[in-house]
Image: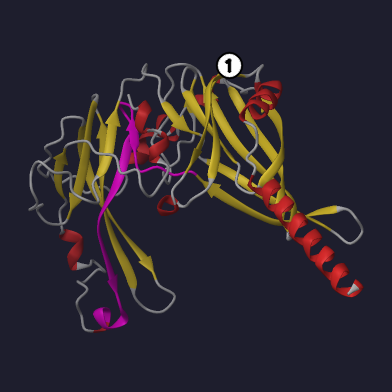
Amino acid sequence: MRLRIVLVAASLLVCFASTTAQTRRSTPPDSASLRASFLATFGNDFELVQDKITSRSNESGGGDFWLAFVKARHPGYFTLQYSFKRNDKHYSHEEREIHITVAPKGCRRGPPSSGVYPRFCLGDTIIVPVLLSGGSGFEFKLTKQAPATDEDWKTFDEKYPESRDGNLDKTPVTNPSESLRYVGRRAYKLLHRKPGYTLQLLADFEAVKPGKFNLLVTSSAYSGPADKTPAGSIPIIVVDRSTPLTLIAGREQVRGFTMGHSGQEYVSSTSGNSYMTSLIVLQPGDRISVLYLSARRDPLFERQGYTRPGGVDPAEATAPVISVHPFALETRYDFSAWLADYLP
């Protein structure tokens, strides 16, 4: 009987400890404490315009985030770091670093790279995402550096404008867009490890005046309904250089730490993470390249003589077909939902 009582008591103790641990893990960080800690670290350099906690659906990738909407008080290079304890047996804590470049007001931001904007202008609202899921004990840290010269704020296109038209086929094609000027097309062959390659054709555009639309570039004419925005089209907004924007600080570095047997922590994993969006916001003078044809060629294709003399693939003569559609922003699969209420 005594043994049974001891076992029941031990079982209750385990259940209580498990329930307590689950409660501790499921309790989200307090928004007010996050705000206070954030301001104590970044308040001299960034104005906190607003903040909110948001949850992403499983369809979007899941996760709970605290979003800090900030405006830089002056130009510069900033590294915003936050760390937190992980409720994970493999990691003791995690560090995430977000690098932000803020140029003077009215700057050229340049087009996004892989769905992420490389710089912001003074006056822009920058969304800084802080991952909350599975974390506790959040701490913030800031490092910053002033720009060396005004030359630092020039984009690559501004420094080397002659490089933009290299290898462009400028044969005219019909372009219904008033905001984007078609400047030409280019072809690339991505060689495979085994014989063969993948042919890619891209159409280049330059923003010329403000507008808001979806762009579709294909290798054949669009045959869908005219009043609906087709899947695969690109949401584009062209704004004047003086227009402030709300954009996401979209690229971060992640370091996971593990507690060693000696009682000291060590870096056990490193990775990168991006908060990508499908939305492209441009200023007059910005250029983008849009893929409109991709064809995989195997060794048989070349051996049977389908490649023209001189190494020109017959498909390289395919011209782009351009169509413009009503603006529509897909928010289910990337982080565009964070921008949907703040579009210019």
Residue drawn at (20%, 80%) of the image: 305
Which percent across, then down, holds residue 96?
Answer: 65, 43
Q: In this rendered view, identify the residue nearer to me: 56 or 97.
A: 56
Q: In this view, does 38 lie above or below 174?
A: above
In the rendered image, residue 293, in percent from the top left (x then y), is placed at: 23, 59
**Residue 235 versus residue 314 in the image, above or below:** above
Q: Residues within 10 Å of mark 1 (few under 14, many from 20)?
A: some
Instruction: Tell me if residue 35 comes above or below residue 313 in the rendering.
Output: above
The residue at the point 89 percent across, 62 percent down is 261
Can the viewer see residue 165 in this picture? Answer: no
- Of residues 290 and 150, the one drawn nearer to the viewer in this rendering: 290
Say what amino acid the circle numbered 1 marks: His
Position in image of residue 320 (x %, y %): 16, 51
Q: What residue is shown at x 9% (from left), y 41% (from top)?
A: 227
Tally of marks: 1
On-image quarter of the C terminus: top left
Secondary element under disc 1, as helix, strand or loop, is loop
Residues 79 and 139: in front is 139
- Residue 164 visible, this angle: yes
Q: Residue at x 26, y 69 (%)?
A: 311
Q: Give the range drawn in magenta.
A: 275-302
- Left or right: 114 as drawn, with respect to 34: left
Residue 230: give x, y in percent of width and height: 18, 48
Residue at mark 1: 74
